[in-house]
Image: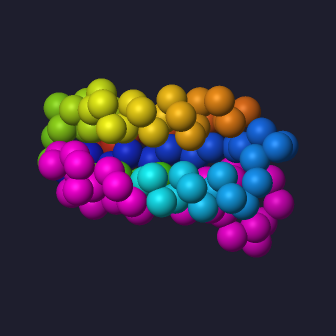
Amino acid sequence: MIRHVVMFKWANDVDAAHVAAITAEFATLPPAIEQIRSYSYGPDLGAVAGNFDYVVIGEFDSIDDFFAYRDHPAHQALVNAFIAPYVTERRAVQFAVS
């Protein structure tokens, strides 16, 4: 099992409506991308200063399944429309889960 974790820091002009819209868009991916085994996402709770603003965690059976998700047109459309123009910082990691 492969776990993919990605965190974003939003630009200063990103508002609650955009965060709600992106959350709704993330909900559309598991039904559209069969390689997703588990998918969690959401905004930071704001409990600790300096945290990133949003996280996505996906699980996949293999690294090839992760790449299929990464390159899937639905995922790419979400990234291009809702993430890339609004992010000032991004961090990601993929690791094997035993």
Is residue 27 positioned above or below 73 on the image? below
Query: Toward the viewer: 10 or 98?
Result: 10
Is residue 2 positioned above or below 23 on the image? above
Query: Toward the viewer: 67 or 71?
Result: 71
**Residue 88 left/right relative to 24:** right
Q: Residue at x 45, y 52 (%)?
A: 25
> In the rendered image, is residue 89 in sight?
no
**Residue 95 left/right relative to 7:** left
- The spot of residue 17 in percent (x, y) is 68, 59
Q: Residue at x 50, y 44 (%)?
A: 6
- The spot of residue 65 in percent (x, y) is 18, 38
- The spot of residue 48 in percent (x, y) is 77, 66
**Residue 22 left/right relative to 59:** right
Query: Toward the viewer: 98 or 60?
Result: 60
Is residue 18 positioned above or below 16 on the image? above
34 inside magenta stretch:
yes
The color scheme shown is rainbow
- The spot of residue 53 in percent (x, y) is 69, 53
> In the rendered image, is residue 69 in sight?
yes
Tell me how many marks there are: 0
Quadrant into which the C terminus falls = bottom left
Q: Residue at x 76, y 67 (%)?
A: 46
State the image quarter where residue 20 is shown: bottom right
Which residues lie in the magenta part? Answer: 27-55
Q: Residue at x 58, y 37 (%)?
A: 83
67 inside magenta stretch:
no
